[in-house]
Image (cartoon, rainbow, N blue to C red):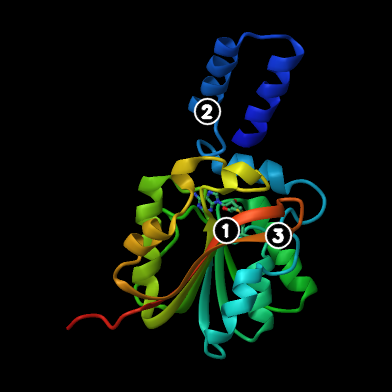
Amino acid sequence: MQLAAATFYEKMATASSIRASQFHFLKNMTQASNTPFSDPAQTWNARFAKEGYVFGTEPNAWLRRHAGVIKSGARILSVADGEGRNSVWLAKQGHQVDAFDISDVGVAKARKLADQSQVSVNFSVAGCDDFEWVPAHYDAIVAIFIQFADPDLRSRLFANMVQSLKPGGTLLLQGYTPKQLEFRTGGPGLLSHLYTPDLLREAFGEMDIQILEAYEADLNEGDGHHGRSAVIGLLAVRRPIAP
Ligand SMILES: C[S@@+](CC[C@H](N)C(=O)[O-])C[C@H]1O[C@@H](n2cnc3c(N)ncnc32)[C@H](O)[C@@H]1O
């Protein structure tokens, strides 16, 4: 991860007394060239290759708290679903769930989790630009910690998410705010990938935003998201399509 790489160079700078200017050069080189965002499938496959579930097997707390608004037996998409903790939990609630992720290693673990839980989820391995987005198809879309997306990718992804919701469909989204850069307990460590309330209000201006809450919480989502964290949650509903 970029954050891990930066920390590595910080340690290196201390250990071998590299001057501050050299340290910043090295750090910028890391950020410019081999970031987790330049080859996300490889980065996430390596991360998910380890034993166990990086973000645990329990669903995200924001999702669990608000999923009650979704009608029973709904058709739901879990975006960048990782190792399946959210999609599998939604399927256990009786929903029909589609899920995709760019990491085939993550999806293989998600399939295993679904099998162990004796539920069925329609998984696919796809990047968010390649996924087959069907217009007005889902009753709900769940997007939990999808901050791999830089501003350009994010605007395409958010537009696809909105278009794929049925009118009246619900979007449940959780991410980190810029304050997370102080906690460093998870997330991309890149300001341009983080969400503010204003950013989400503008991005989802064409939806009815019912809950938009920036808050601090102690996350306990495996080793991946652990400890005091600055997060934001959104619950928004797609308006009827204008005639
Ligand atoms: C922080 S993890 C969150 C996983 C899952 N949503 C959860 O809450 O457990 C980010 C996920 O995004 C996936 N990802 C990264 N870049 C992607 C892309 N361009 N398209 C689709 N998935 C991507 C990674 O493989 C990883 O599973």
- Residue denoted by label 1: 231
Which kind of residue does numbered mark 1 sit on?
Val
Residue reaching furthest left? 243
Element under label 2?
helix
Q: CA distance from mark 3 to mark 2?
A: 27 Å
Q: Residues within 10 Å of mark 3 (few under 14, many from 20)?
A: some
- In the rendered image, which residue does mark 2 sit on? 31
Of residues 144 and 165, the one nearer the viewer is: 144
**In this rendering, the label closer to the viewer, 3 or 2:** 3
Q: Does residue 23 appear left or right of residue 140 in this picture?
A: right
The relative height of residue 192 versus residue 11 in the rendered view (above or below) is below
Q: Is residue 61 visible?
A: yes
Please give the name of the residue rendered at 31% of the width and 80% of the height, measured from the top-left corner. Answer: 239
Q: Is there CB contact under 8 Å for labels 1 and 3?
A: yes
Give the alpha-carbon distance from disc 1 to disc 2, as whole Å: 24 Å
Q: Which mark is residue 61?
A: none
Of the 4 image quadrants, the one containing the N terminus is top right
Residue matched to label 3: 219
The residue at the far right in this view is: 51
What residue is drawn where x is 55% and y is 42%?
A: 40
Q: Quadrant of ligand 1?
A: bottom right
Determine the image quadrant of residue 89: bottom right
